[in-house]
Each structure stands twice: as C-alpha cells, then as structure tokens.
Image (cartoon, rainbow, N blue to C red):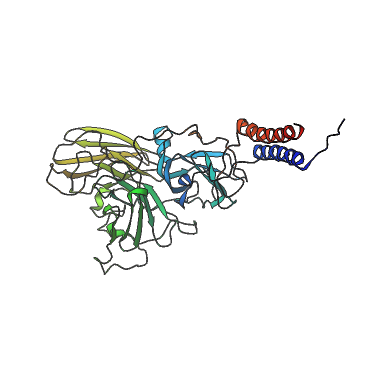
Amino acid sequence: MRRRELTIPTILGILFSLAGMGAGVWFLREPIRSAVFASPEETPTQVRVTNITDSSFVVSWLTDKAASGFIQYGQSANPDQVVSDDRDQERGTVDNYLTHLVTVRGLKPSTAYIFRIGSAKKTYDQQGQPYQVMTGLTLGNPPAADVAYGQVLSANGEPAEGALVYLSLPGAVPQAALVKSSGSWVIPLSTARSADLTSFAAYDPRTSHIQLQVQGGSLGSSTVTTTTDQDSPVPTITLGQTYNYLAANPAAVETTPEAPSSSRCSSGFAGPATETTSSLAIVSPKTGEQVNTAQPEIIGRGPANSQVTITINSPAITGSVTTNASGNFSFTTPADLPPGEHTITISTVVDGVVKKIQRNFTVLAAGESQIPAFAATPSGTIKPSPTPKPSPTPTLAPRVSLPSTESGVPTSGNLTPTLVLLILGSGLILSGLVVYRKLA
C-alpha cells in the first residue's frame, strides 16, 4: 500500500483552514472598526461644549446624514449614563437630525465628567480618549434678567428650525441654543459663567461686543458681529449671509461693566423702569412694539422654577408656564390675535407677594409690514422629510447602560454568527478540496 504523505498543497489547505478559524475567533472578540460598517456621514463634526454651569453643560455637533444623537457620560472611565437630544426629551420620541444639541443636567458642582458622543448606534471619542468637562462652583444671586434673542431664516425665507446658534461674549463661557420651529432663538446672557467658571460673566449691557455663529448644516451658516444693545432682538439672520453691525455703530467700544442707568430696566432692556420688579420681567415684546404675527412669543423672567401666569386681553387668553432653573421662560400665544393693540399681563409670587407686570404691543395686519413673522408657525425644517426612524437606540431615561468605546473610532456590534461560519467554512472547504484533489 502506498503511503500517503503530506505535500505542500495539503499543508496550504490546512493553513488556510486554521487562518479562517483564527479570523473568526478574532472577529468575535473584537468590535468592528471598518469604515464599511461605520458610516462617515454619521460621524460627529464641529463638536462644541457650551453653557457650562455648576450642574449642567451642553454638547452640540453636526452630522452629514440625519441620525439620532445622544451623550454617554459619567465620572468613571466607562460612563453608563445617557441623555438624548433636547428635542427628543421635549417630544418624548427619538428622531434623526443633521444638527444635534444635548443638555446634560443634574451634575455635581466643581466635578470632572467624561463623555462620549453617540450618533446612530455608535459612540465616538477623541482618538481613544473621552471628552472631558469640569462643572463650576455653585453661585447665588444671579444678575437681573438679560437675554439675547432673534430669528433665523433659511435662504428661501423659511424659519431655519434646528439650526444651532452660538454666542461668544468676551471673558465668558460660550453659549448655544437651538432655533425653534418659528425660527426664533433665545440665549440668556446674565446667567452665563465667566471663562474660569468662578462667577457670572461681567459685561456691559450696552457696549460689549457679541459674536454670533449660526450653523444650519446643509442650509448654510452665518456670522453676526454686534453689541449688547442690539441683541434684543438681533436683526433677522438669513443663513448664508454675514452681518457686522459694529460698522453701523462705530462709537461702540468695550467698557468696564457698570450698573444699568435709571433709564434702563433692571432686566437689561430699554423701557420704563416701572415694568420690572427685582425678579419679574417681560423681555419680549417690548412696550409699544409692532409685531406682524398673530401668535407672538412672550419671553420673560421670573423666580427660578416658579409658575408664571400670562394673560393677553382682546381677546382674553390665559396660560401659564414654569420658569427654568435660570428663571427664564417663553410662551407662544396658543390662538391668533386680531390686528390692533393688545395688553400682556404676567404675574407670579415673589417673596410671598403676588407681583404683576403689564405692557402693550400691537399686532400688524397682513401685508402691513415686511418684517418676518416671529411666531411658532409650521415651517420648513432641517430634518429630511420623511424622517427615517432609527432602530433601537438609547431611551430618554438618563441612566441607560451602553457599550463603551475603546478607541477614537466608532464602536459597533460584533460580526454575526452567520458571517463567522462563512469564514470558517470557506477555510475548511478549501482545505477539503486540496486534500480530495491529492487523494484522487
């Protein structure tokens, strides 16, 4: 009987088989990091950390493809707490967006936190290292209310819902806000922290310079340079345009912050001093302001986490809203107001006493003004339509366990058993063919 010997082809077949088995085991143990599975269109870009306080911070970014977004954060090396996009928290559902803004709340003061950015079903960090942020000290007695606000439109004149507005004030932590469906945005200035987080930002309410950057993703971007006396409201911003209002006001220069004069409200807005109290203010509309929307947005300030009652006369409309931790609130008129003069009355309890503020404004008739409407009306949106629904993602609950990221590239799931079997099978089949050919 002829003795069969192992030949080079047979040995190669065995080696292929072993290689296939080894590859299968490796893929089962290691996450997929190939660009084939990690779409660059879902990779976060232009990541910014803003609005840092003693108990919260904001993270925002862009993606080239609409995707769900979340932040995975904590104090340990493997953070397991998750919070979703602000819009998802408001609506109670997870959606896909091109622009993303997540507010992380309920943090400890003067504490270091790490976080990773979630996009679709992957998490991202900085070349293997998580992002880091330090919260500030707890501060008391915030300054009188002062906000910057305005409206952002797309190039075709529609409200740029979902655009990101960034505000930079010298010596202060950068601030950010999302543009609402009406095209409006609001950023509190008085509660912004100094760059070292040890105090509230110091600025002059009339002459300090403000830099605004608006990022609308595929809708374009804009830059605005102005001063604090022209920020309530900032003139309407159209994406794709650059604005410099310092050139129109060459006398505007930076000065040492000082207390508001008697001709200026304690809230930092022009108007009769009798229209504010130490803790209650109407920011918009201003006294005698003419608006060309039937559903104006009421913006103001009251005691933190308190209920404010809002009444509009002719016709009689009553509603209520709860102020946030900074004392700010906004209220959109739920029904159309007829053209003509109207009266707003807001009331709340301040130091055990009911305080009220009243002011008049005028709603213009259709075609009476060319100013874009500043109201919450249905409009175009940055989100694609229809919006694709994501597969299961982190829930809105602030504590959800997710896989951690081990490197600076996105992490996804492992290879499926079917794919592994194909890898193993291909090696075994190749080995069998070589041995069969030899024996034949």
Quadrant containing the C terminus is top right
Q: Nearer the viewer, residue 424 or 324?
A: 424
Q: Position of residue 300 (x, y in %)?
A: 31, 45
Q: Is residue 108 left or right of residue 184?
A: right
Image quadrant assignment for residue 436: top right
Quick check: can you spot residue 191?
no
Q: Residue at image x 16%, y 49%?
A: 370
- Give the answer, above or below, for where 25 lies relative to 177: above
Q: Position of residue 407 (x, y in %)?
A: 60, 48
Q: Nearer the viewer, residue 350 or 209?
A: 209
Image quadrant assignment for residue 85: top left
Q: Position of residue 184 (x, y in %)?
A: 30, 46
Q: Position of residue 86 (x, y in %)?
A: 42, 40
Q: Nearer the viewer, residue 223 or 435?
A: 435
Q: Residue at image x 41%, y 38%?
A: 96
Q: Residue at image x 25%, y 45%?
A: 158
Q: Residue furthest right?
A: 1
- Give the answer, above or below, for where 235 lies relative to 363: below
| Count of numbered tags | 0
Q: Is residue 271 left or right of residue 366?
A: right
Q: Residue at image x 37%, y 39%?
A: 352
Quadrant containing the N terminus is top right
Q: Is residue 210 left or right of residue 156?
A: right
Quick check: can you spot residue 287?
yes
